[in-house]
């Protein structure tokens, strides 16, 4: 699998980091936060090949470039349908978003196949991905793609969440767990209040899941000492490889 980080940051765009966006095998885009679309273009990604967009949740930092993505696809002559999946309210959100940005009637000529994912967990139609509900307000989903017949391999993206055993179960045996890691342990109270995880807690989830590697994600713009602390604290809890997500990072997994 090829994992392309279009945006690795938190709620604010910084000089180094756009808001969340992860492209998997050039086909599936998980979130489309502010700045992530520009990074995909700089990387030379062919948007015509993107088959689906999986939204973890509907906060602005995870959907800020979604309308621009949909407009760009139309302007570049997209013909194929685009699947959009997300938590309860996604269908209405996409409709409202296109209306609020004054999308001309009939402008989007390709089919938008939007569906809400309802419940605590599930497997997508056709088995293309599985998902579970995280702990966040508003509701946020974690996604697993590329798992083998025995459930191992592939990548799991946690979305914004507190550390959860059910996310670890979704990520069981994954080659890579991309997990919310916004805060060092010294800011644990802020992590709890904002429904995010510390890097140490992300390390716990990776250990529970027996993942092959952990990518620390949703990185705030606090500089190198903060980033080094995240890596150190995650590594104290997880013995596998720990990687700090950076914009435009591309990783390949067998």
Image (tube, rainbow, N blue to C red):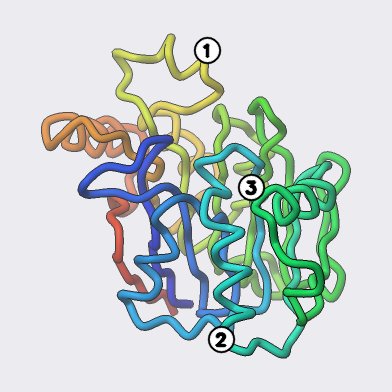
* Residue for badge 3: 56
- Residue 184 pos. (x, y %): 30, 23
Determine the secondary structure under disc 2: loop
Q: Secondary structure at mark 3?
A: loop
Which badge, 3 or 1, is on the more N-terminal residue? 3
Residue 242 visible in the current orientation: no
Q: Which residue is mark 2?
A: 76
Q: CA separation, marks 2 and 1?
A: 42 Å
Whole-percent x, y for residue 66 in the image: 59, 58
Q: Nearer the viewer, residue 41 or 109?
A: 109
In space, the residues marked 3 and 1 are separated at their CA atoms by: 19 Å
Q: Nearer the viewer, residue 185 or 213?
A: 185
Nearest the viewer among 100 and 85 is: 100
Residue at screen point 57% across, 32% down: 161
Instruction: Answer yes or no: is residue 176 visible.
Output: yes
* Residue identifier under label 1: 193
Residue 228 vs 3, above or below: the answer is: above
3 or 2: mark nearer the eye: 2
Q: Residues within 10 Å of mark 3 (few under 14, many from 20)?
A: many
* Circles 3 and 2: CB atoms closer than 8 Å: no
Mark 3 and mark 2: Cα distance apart in space: 26 Å
């Amino acid at each position: 699998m090829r994992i392309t980080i279009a945006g690795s940051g938190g709620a604010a765009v910084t000089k180094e980091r756009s808001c969340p966006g992860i492209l998997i095998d050039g086909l599936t885009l998980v979130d489309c936060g502010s700045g992530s679309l520009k990074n995909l273009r700089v990387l030379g990604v062919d948007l015509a090949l993107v088959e689906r967009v999986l939204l973890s949740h509907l906060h602005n930092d995870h959907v800020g470039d979604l309308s621009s993505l949909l407009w760009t696809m139309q302007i570049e002559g997209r013909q194929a349908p685009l699947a959009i999946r997300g938590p309860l309210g996604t269908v209405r959100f996409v409709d409202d978003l296109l209306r609020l940005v004054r999308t001309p009637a009939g402008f989007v000529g390709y089919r938008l196949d939007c569906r809400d994912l309802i419940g605590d967990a599930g497997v997508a139609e056709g088995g293309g991905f599985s998902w579970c509900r995280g702990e966040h307000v508003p509701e946020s989903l974690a996604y697993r793609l590329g798992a083998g017949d025995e459930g191992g391999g592939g990548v799991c993206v946690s979305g914004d969440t507190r550390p959860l055993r059910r996310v670890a179960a979704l990520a069981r045996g994954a080659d890579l767990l991309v997990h919310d890691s916004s805060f060092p342990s010294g800011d644990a109270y802020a992590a709890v209040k904002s429904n995010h995880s510390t890097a140490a807690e992300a390390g716990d989830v990776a250990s529970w899941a027996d993942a092959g590697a952990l990518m620390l994600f949703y990185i705030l713009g606090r500089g190198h000492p903060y980033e080094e602390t995240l890596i150190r604290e995650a590594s104290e809890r997880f013995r596998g490889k720990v990687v700090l997500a950076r914009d435009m990072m591309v990783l390949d997994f067998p």
